[in-house]
Image: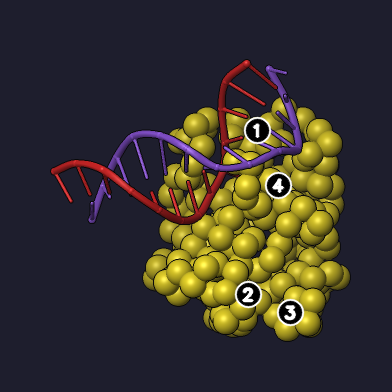
Chain colours: A yellow, B purple, C red
Amino acid sequence: MSKSDSLQFLEKSAVTVAKELIGWRLYVKQTDNTLVGGTIIETEAYTQVDAASHSYRGETKRTSTMFGPPGHIYVYFTYGMHYCMNIVTGKTGSGQAVLLRSLQLDKGVAIARQRRGFVADNQLTNGPAKICQALSVNMHDNGSLINDSRFILKPPIVPVSSVATTRIGITKDRHRLWRFVAADS
DNA sequence: ATGGGGATCGTCT
DNA sequence: GACGATCCCCATC
């Protein structure tokens, strides 16, 4: 699959992408040109009809990336101290994104351990803010285009099946089964 | 093993 | 002026 095929995949709706993104691999280039990242094993979909989504009340300065073209990275800052990253999906202007919630690291484990304060290896990237801390992603990366920036996204080597559940850490629209987890995790 | 609360600030009401 | 698409520590069971 080529670079343009990856971008074409991201034109699908957020719910479809969130489900099918399980098993894809995300890597982020570091300042020394090495890679940190691994396999995506947990995602959540957010859309404009969804009261839990940042895009629910329309475009603002903060959410403008979410309303831009698919394939870009939407980073937001929350709880006064954490960053979380999404991949924008769907038609341009539709306000959809997929939140990355958990990765299985396979590159850059040593630097990730250092950045995460030497927690247990299974806790390095098992949360949206942990991913950003381990991969060194912050607001400067907001708006970056996948495969044309620090961010590299590759399709699965073998397809990975996923299970749909309710989302985490939200108070509105909790009923939607828009969280997807790798079946074997 | 599980649960409550503190840290900390940009964004929107 | 309130509240998070969170994480971590500490208390308690």
Could you say where residue A113 lies in the image, as x and y percent from the top left? 54, 75
Give the distance between the C-alpha atoms of the residues marked 4 and 1, in whole angstroms.
Answer: 19 Å
- Residue A4 horizontal side relative to residue C11, left or right: right
- The residue indicated by pointer 2 is A37
Q: What residue type is labelled 1?
A: Val
Q: Which of marks 3 and 4 is in front?
A: 4
Single out the mark in the foreground, 1 or 2. Answer: 2
Residue occupied by mark 1: A49
Q: Residue flagged by tag 4: what amino acid is it?
A: Tyr
Q: Quadrant of residue A63?
A: top right
Query: Mark 3 highlights which residue?
Result: A1
Question: Is label 2 in a helix, a strand or a loop?
Answer: strand
Label 2 vs 4, first from the N-terminus? 2
Same chain letter for marks 3 and 4: yes
Q: Earlier in the sequence, mark 1 or mark 2?
A: 2
Q: For the residues tagged 3 and 1, is the chain the same?
A: yes
Q: Which amino acid does label 2 sit on?
A: Gly
Give neighbour class at mark 3: few <14, some 14-19, many 20+ (Cα, 10 Å): few
- Using the rendered image of the protein, determine whether residue A58 is visible from the camera's viewpoint: yes
**Label 2 with label 3: CB-CB less than 8 Å:** no
Q: Are marks 3 and 4 in contact (CB under 8 Å)?
A: no
Query: Is disc 3 on the same chain as disc 2?
Result: yes
Q: Which label was assigned to residue A134? A: none
Disc 2 and disc 4 on one polypeptide chain = yes
